[in-house]
Structure formats: C-alpha cells, structure tokens
C-alpha cells in the first residue's frame, strides 16, 4: 500500500494495520509492535555493517550477468552474517535474565511459603527457624519506633 | 461535576461523522512537516499564502478562517482573529505541541527504511563528473 502526501513524500505500508495507524497519526517509536520501537529501545540489532548492502538505488546499475550472480551469492552470505549477529545481540540482551529470574522466584518462595506449607507444619518441622522468622517481623517496627523517638 | 454548558442541549446538530472528523485530523499538516516549519528561517506563512492542509504553500481563499490572517505555526491552525489566536497560545494543547516540537526529529521515511534493515539511498556518482569524463 502506498500513500503519496501532497508534498510528494511517499509512504509505503506493509499492511492495512500500519496504514490505519499512520492515519491515526501514531508515533511508531511509541507503538510496541513496530520495528521503530524495537530499535529505539535496544531490542533489535542497530547500526550494523550488514545494513549497508540493501539500499534504494536511484540510479540503477546496468544489467550484467556476472554481477547478478555474485550479488545473489552475497545476499545469502550477508543474511547469514546478519542473523548470527542478531542472535548474539539477543544472547547479550538475555545474559542476566536466568539469574534474575531464579533470584526472584526464590524470593517469592521465601515470602509466601505459607501458601504451600501451613504455619503449624512449618513450626513442627523447624521450630527454631520458624521462631527466628517471627522475631525478625516483630523486631522491625520496634527499631523504627526507637528511631523516631 | 457536570458537563460544560457549551456541550449541553446540542443534540446531533453540530456533530460530524466519525470518518469526516478523522479525515480532517489526518489532513492537517503532519508532525514532521511542522517540525521543519518551526525551524525554517523564512516564515512558512504570510498574509496571502500559507501552509494550508498538507500542501507546501497555497493562496488563501475565503473559506479559510479569518481569511488566513491568523495562523499558529506549531499547531498548523487558522483562527478568526488576533484575540482567539492569542488565547489559543495560552492553552494546554498549544504548549504541549511546543514541547513535542522542541524534541528530536519525528519518525521519517529514512528512519522507516533503516528500521527495515536498509541503508541510505544510493544516488550513484555525481552526474557532472561523468559528463566531464565523456568530454562534453
Ligand atoms: Zn498553537
């Protein structure tokens, strides 16, 4: 789908969803499913040398059999390289995720253990540890009060 | 708190259809055009010609509010008289717009192509050099 604005700027849309959003004058940098959003927020690979190959040629090359053959070969190679780099970018982005996820899950388990195990059962299993936990909870407000005074 | 008095008892008289209202919204100058308008050294609007709709420069006709004399460049909007233009400049939408226009360049076609994984457009070598080589 193509829209030509009356200052001769041309806009191409991949689907009517994009066209509709354009007509609503939405900012693509703020709409989460767009490429513009993903680039602006560091989700996708940006500023890579593989982006320099595909360009709009305003002065077309003369047809040459050898050039075409070579370009077709190069296209595959460039795509492979770009994919490898994008994968590496994703790996880097997700590097600390497993660790933070585990830490968060541990915290939830510790704070909400009463949902899994009833307090009497906890007390029976580990009386000292359970009493220790209670102590901490009671001790915290007391120290706050003394600080306020 | 009830509705403001000007909204009362209007019925369907002053209401436009959804499509008409949306079209007017779309046909106003786009934010990237206005972003450039604000930064232009020579004013985009004088008494007789102005950026009407999305066209670059058109002569005003009688249908334009206030014969096109009172124009707010950031909001690309015509007003009936100097007073309404002035009072518009004190409103929140106008100030919000100014804030947006102070920011970075809005999303453009070049950005869109870069996001799709394309480089800058290739215009080839300058034509004048080629002509010199050919001996013209
Ligand atoms: Zn304004």
Image (cartoon, rainbow, N blue to C red):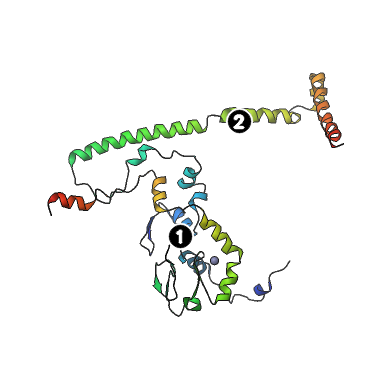
Asked whether B68 or B21 is in front, the reply is B68
From mark 1 to mark 2, how far is it between C-alphas?
A: 48 Å
At which x and y percent is residue B47? Answer: 45, 75
Left or right of A61: which side holds A127? right
Badge 1 sits on which subunit? B
Residue B104 in view, yes or no: yes
On the image, which quarter does residue B115 sit in?
Answer: top left
Residue name at image x 61 percent, y 66 percent: B91
Q: Residue furthest left?
A: B135
At which x and y percent is residue B87? Answer: 60, 71
Q: Residue furthest front?
A: B41
Badge 2 sits on which subunit? A
At which x and y percent is residue B48? Answer: 42, 76
Q: Which mark is residue B39?
A: 1
At which x and y percent is residue B102? Answer: 52, 56
Give the number of the mark in front: 1 or 2.
1
Please state, as top left, top right, bottom left or bottom right, where the N terminus of chain B lies in the image: bottom right
Asked whether A87 or B41 is in front, the reply is B41
Count of numbered circles in the view: 2
On the image, which quarter does residue A88 sit in?
Answer: top left
Residue name at image x 57 percent, y 64 percent: B94
Q: Residues within 10 Å of mark 2 (few under 14, many from 20)?
A: few
Residue A1 in view, yes or no: no
Q: Secondary structure at mark 1?
A: helix
The residue wearing badge 2 is A101
Q: Are marks 1 and 2 on the same chain?
A: no
Residue name at image x 18 percent, y 40 percent: A65
């Amino acid at each position: 789908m193509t829209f030509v604005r009356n200052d001769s700027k041309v806009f191409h849309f991949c689907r009517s969803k994009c066209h509709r959003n354009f007509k609503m004058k939405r900012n693509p940098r703020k709409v989460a499913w767009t490429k513009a959003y993903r680039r602006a927020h560091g989700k996708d690979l940006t500023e890579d040398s593989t982006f320099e190959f595909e360009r709009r040629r305003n002065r077309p090359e003369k047809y040459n059999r050898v050039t075409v053959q070579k370009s077709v070969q190069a296209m595959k190679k460039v795509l492979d390289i770009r994919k490898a780099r994008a994968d590496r970018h994703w790996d880097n982005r997700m590097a600390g995720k497993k660790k933070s996820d585990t830490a968060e899950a541990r915290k939830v388990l510790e704070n909400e253990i009463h949902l899994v195990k009833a307090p009497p059962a906890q007390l029976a299993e580990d009386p000292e540890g359970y009493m220790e936990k209670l102590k901490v909870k009671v001790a915290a407000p007391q120290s706050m009060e003394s600080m306020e005074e | 708190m009830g509705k403001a008095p000007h909204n009362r008892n209007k019925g369907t008289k002053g209401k436009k259809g959804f499509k008409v209202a949306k079209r007017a919204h779309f046909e106003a100058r786009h934010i990237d055009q206005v972003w450039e308008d604000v930064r232009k050294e020579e004013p985009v609007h004088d008494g007789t010609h102005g950026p009407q709709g999305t066209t670059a420069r058109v002569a005003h006709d009688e249908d334009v509010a206030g014969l096109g004399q009172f124009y707010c460049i950031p909001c690309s909007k015509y007003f009936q008289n100097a007073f309404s233009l002035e009072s518009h400049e004190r409103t929140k939408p106008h100030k919000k717009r100014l804030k947006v226009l102070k920011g970075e360049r809005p999303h453009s076609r070049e950005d869109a192509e870069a996001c799709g994984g394309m480089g800058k457009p290739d215009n080839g070598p300058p034509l004048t050099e080629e002509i010199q080589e050919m001996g013209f």
